[in-house]
Image: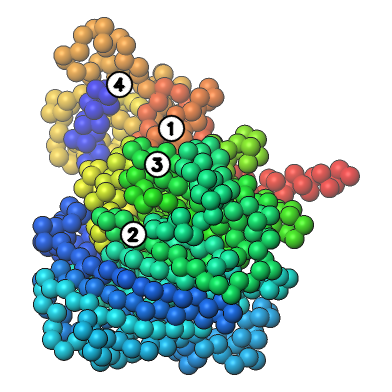
């Protein structure tokens, strides 16, 4: 079959088709406004030039470096007054080749200063409805004073250091430059008022429970943190306005947290004084949990937690946490409350065991004791499989109202049942999904440490993509949790889920490659669209094998390092031999959408009789039959040649025996086995959408069979608007469907089939029904 096609096609190329293609067809196909090659042009102009820090392969270069910031902190939580006090020593190592004249420290809590400019950065008109608490915060009550109070900044010898605060950034004016390769220590003493995160929509704070008078704290961004200095941005000191998240260097942490003695505290890092802060009973249960791989063990039961709700201990207890040597951490968070129920189980990864942990007040039950730790465990297993074994010793999911926020080893998650303990499927799946998502952030950006302030999609997009895979695994592993034989109802990931966004109002869409502060719809922009883009890349463009290897290569190359978008884009190509510049360009650098259709089908007959066009061609050049090799012609149904000689004949009557033209070196046997096509069609596909995609076509034949063909995206490289394909077949073609499984996020499927579906038929049927009644 292949040999025949080759032979036949090359003949046409040599003669009639050359004329047709050059003189008529190409002119007709090019439409104004389409600069055809640009969509497949390599991204040299968009990408930064590779250098010795970052290689063209997408791997860290030979001179790659990163700074290190180690923290020793004493923290005190004043539960009565909802204040937090800290005294921290930062040891900063300058691994860069540059001498640094000053250091930048992030004061994220200053976004909650009384006179914060963050609230003034958005233009706002009158809304049609307001959440009462937000309205009161904005227009009625005096604004909350939640900024840092810096009491002192001192060098290692205790001498005050001069500093300048610019909103959420503090410049430490060191007396001499910190030389390349040198290290310096300095301390900061601070305190601030903890906000009620349920009112302030903060990523950190407390929830107050009026029924028992308790608070549950989820505390993060709570200490002055070093900014990143690197080869890409210099100091990443872009202000924290609220949407763009964080950029943080790696380091080691030693943190002592003093809280009321009846509180349960868990945090980033390994608990150092477990025997001091645990009761004997808790120790016993903890040892059981370390061996329990199938279900969580309660360390603090609901009964025990409830019993403490009225105790309000005046005593204090200090919980000591320390990160493991060699296991770098980029941040620190903790949770504290006397209301917390606590459960844990062990999780087996390829080469090690880790602990899946949950903390929740009774308000989270029964949902939390049923699902949280299960979701944590599934996340660790699925993500580890696709990246690297989870390197930390535990992953904690803390229940906090309306929260979904991540820190190393610990995260806050929503999902609260009704007061009577009942809950909807929506609450259940929302809770499982947010836990998978936030625990998943341990991988992106806590370990593969991208710059969230600049690129929201690098952590949110990659994490949401992985979340989809983990949710699907969860559905398979816990069929009792979801409806029988159903898939896990993922909210994001599948191609069809992003269509409403990509087909929406262009003036409210930004490219994925945008700063999170500057986009209108951060959810679809930084989460949904990149997740879908990666899912399509995996399932439709690259295939699972090539994608998974390349994605894992990226994760392993940049584990405990700071990647940029180019490092990701380049690695995916480097490890797969798939040119994806067109894909990154379409999906990540533009707001284009996918829309591919079938425009029309022409039927042709193969004939041995000279066509009118051929006769003219020969006459113009004074050619005779003797000057030419044997020729065959494709004659369009309805054309002049067709009407004169072929009309009414069956294809078999007009086709010359094409087998005559087969390769000389084929044996008679081989020749006999070759099937001879009877039907020829020219199919025109068009692409109203900007993004080139593989052209996935299902051909349907009169005998009821179908054939699926995927033409590579490069089919669009020379003509961005329209392409044609000649289809040869032994069977009569009766239908064509583009993207039959809806895997490309095609925004308009009304042009995806031939013959064109009668759009009115449903309505007509409906009318007839109504009339009949
Ligand atoms: Zn996220």
Quadrant of the image occupied by residue 296 = top right
Q: Quadrant of residue 65?
A: bottom left
Mark 3 or 1, which is nearer the eye? 3
In the rendered image, the residue lying farthest to the right is 773
Query: Is 339 displayed left or right of 520 in the figure?
Result: right
Mark closer to the chain start, 2 or 3 = 2
Residue under numbered circle 1:
708
Point out the tag, 4 or 2, that comes first from the N-terminus. Answer: 4
Viewer-proximal residue among 654 and 736: 736
Q: Position of residue 460 (x, y in %)?
A: 42, 60
Secondary element under disc 4, as helix, strand or loop, is loop
Q: Secondary structure at mark 1?
A: strand
Could you tell me which residue is drawn at 14 percent across and 79 percent down? 178
Mark positioned earlier in the residue sequence (3 or 4): 4
| Marks 2 and 3, how far apart at CA | 17 Å
Q: For residue 304, what is the image quadrant?
A: bottom right
- Quick check: 453 left or right of 759? left
Residue 637 in the image: x percent, y percent?
43, 34
In the image, is the residue at mark 2 within 8 Å of ligand 1 by its beta carbon?
Answer: no
Q: Residues within 10 Å of mark 1 (few under 14, many from 20)?
A: some
Q: Which residue is mark 2?
A: 323
**Distance between mark 4 and mark 2 Cα atoms:** 65 Å
According to the picture, the residue beneath numbered tag 3 turns out to be 353
Which of the two labelled residues, at mark 2 and mark 1, occupies the earlier sequence position?
2
> Would you call the spot at circle 2 few (<14 residues within 10 Å), some (14-19), or many (20 or more)?
many
Q: Is residue 677 left or right of residue 523?
A: left
Q: Residue at x 43, y 32 (%)?
A: 708
Q: Which residue is mark 4?
A: 1
2 and 3 marks in contact (CB < 8 Å): no
Q: Quadrant of the N terminus?
A: top left
């Amino acid at each position: 079959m292949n040999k025949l096609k080759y032979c036949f096609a090359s003949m046409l190329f040599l003669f009639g088709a050359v004329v047709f293609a050059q003189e008529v067809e190409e002119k007709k196909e090019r439409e104004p406004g389409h600069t055809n090659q640009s969509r497949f042009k390599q991204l040299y102009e968009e990408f930064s030039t590779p250098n010795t820090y970052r290689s063209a392969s997408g791997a860290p270069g030979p001179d790659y470096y990163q700074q290190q910031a180690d923290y020793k902190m004493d923290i005190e939580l004043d539960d009565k007054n909802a204040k937090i006090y800290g005294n921290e020593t930062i040891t900063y190592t300058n691994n860069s080749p540059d001498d640094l004249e000053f250091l930048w420290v992030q004061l994220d809590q200053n976004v909650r200063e009384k006179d914060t400019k963050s609230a003034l950065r958005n233009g706002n008109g009158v809304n049609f409805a307001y959440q009462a608490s937000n309205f009161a915060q904005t227009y009625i009550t005096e604004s909350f004073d939640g900024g840092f109070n810096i009491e002192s900044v001192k060098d290692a010898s205790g001498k005050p250091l001069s500093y300048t605060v610019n909103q959420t950034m503090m410049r430490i004016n060191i007396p001499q430059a910190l030389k390349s390769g040198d290290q310096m220590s300095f301390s900061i003493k601070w305190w601030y008022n903890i906000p009620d995160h349920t009112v302030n929509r903060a990523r950190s704070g407390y929830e107050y429970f009026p029924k028992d008078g308790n608070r549950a704290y989820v505390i993060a961004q709570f200490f002055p943190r070093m900014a990143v200095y690197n080869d890409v941005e210099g100091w990443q000191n872009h202000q924290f306005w609220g949407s763009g998240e964080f950029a943080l260097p790696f380091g080691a942490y030693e943190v002592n947290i003093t809280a009321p003695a009846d509180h349960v505290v868990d945090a980033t890092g390994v608990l150092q004084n477990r025997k001091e802060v645990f009761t004997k009973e808790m120790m016993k249960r903890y040892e059981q949990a370390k061996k329990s791989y199938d279900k969580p063990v309660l360390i603090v039961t609901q009964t025990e937690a409830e019993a403490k709700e009225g105790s309000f201990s005046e005593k204090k207890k200090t919980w000591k946490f320390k990160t493991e040597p060699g296991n770098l951490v980029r941040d620190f968070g903790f949770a504290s409350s006397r209301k917390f129920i606590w459960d844990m189980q062990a999780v087996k990864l390829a080469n090690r065991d880790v602990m899946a942990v949950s903390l929740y007040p009774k308000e989270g039950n029964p949902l939390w004791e049923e699902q949280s730790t299960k979701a944590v465990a599934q996340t660790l297993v699925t993500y580890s499989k696709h990246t690297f074994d989870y390197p930390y010793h535990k992953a904690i999911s803390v229940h906090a109202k309306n929260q979904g926020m991540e820190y190393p080893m610990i995260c806050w998650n929503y999902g609260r049942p009704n007061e009577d303990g009942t809950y909807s499927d929506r609450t259940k799946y929302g809770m499982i999904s947010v836990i998978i998502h936030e625990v998943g952030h341990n991988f992106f950006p806590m370990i593969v440490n991208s710059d969230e302030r600049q690129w929201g999609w690098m952590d949110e997009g990659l994490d949401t993509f992985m979340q989809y895979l983990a949710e699907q695994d969860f559905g398979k592993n816990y069929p009792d949790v979801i409806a029988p034989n159903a898939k896990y109802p993922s909210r994001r990931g599948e191609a069809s889920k992003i269509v409403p966004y990509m087909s929406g109002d262009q003036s409210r869409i930004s490219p994925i490659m945008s700063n999170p502060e500057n986009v209108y719809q951060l959810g679809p922009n930084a989460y949904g669209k990149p997740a879908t883009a990666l899912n399509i890349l995996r399932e439709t463009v690259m295939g699972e094998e090539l994608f998974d290897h390349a994605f894992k290569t990226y994760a392993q190359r940049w584990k405990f390092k700071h990647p940029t978008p180019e490092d990701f884009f380049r690695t995916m190509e480097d490890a797969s031999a798939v040119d994806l510049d067109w894909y990154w360009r379409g999906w990540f650098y533009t707001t284009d959408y996918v829309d591919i259709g079938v425009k029309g089908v022409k039927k042709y007959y193969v004939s041995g009789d000279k066509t009118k066009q051929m006769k003219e061609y020969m006459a113009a050049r004074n050619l005779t039959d003797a000057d030419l090799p044997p020729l065959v012609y494709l004659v369009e149904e309805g054309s002049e040649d067709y009407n004169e000689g072929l009309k009414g004949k069956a294809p078999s009557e007009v086709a010359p025996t094409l087998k005559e033209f087969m390769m000389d070196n084929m044996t008679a046997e081989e020749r006999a086995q070759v099937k001879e096509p009877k039907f020829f069609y020219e199919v025109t596909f068009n692409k109203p959408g900007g993004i080139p995609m593989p052209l996935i076509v299902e051909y349907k034949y009169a005998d009821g069979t179908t054939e699926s063909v995927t033409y590579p995206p490069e089919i669009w490289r020379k003509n961005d608007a329209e392409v044609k394909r000649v289809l040869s077949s032994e069977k009569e073609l009766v239908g064509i469907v583009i993207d039959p499984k809806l895997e490309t996020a095609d925004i308009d499927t009304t042009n995806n089939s031939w013959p064109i579906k009668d759009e009115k038929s449903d309505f007509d049927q409906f009318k007839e029904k109504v009339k009949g009644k």
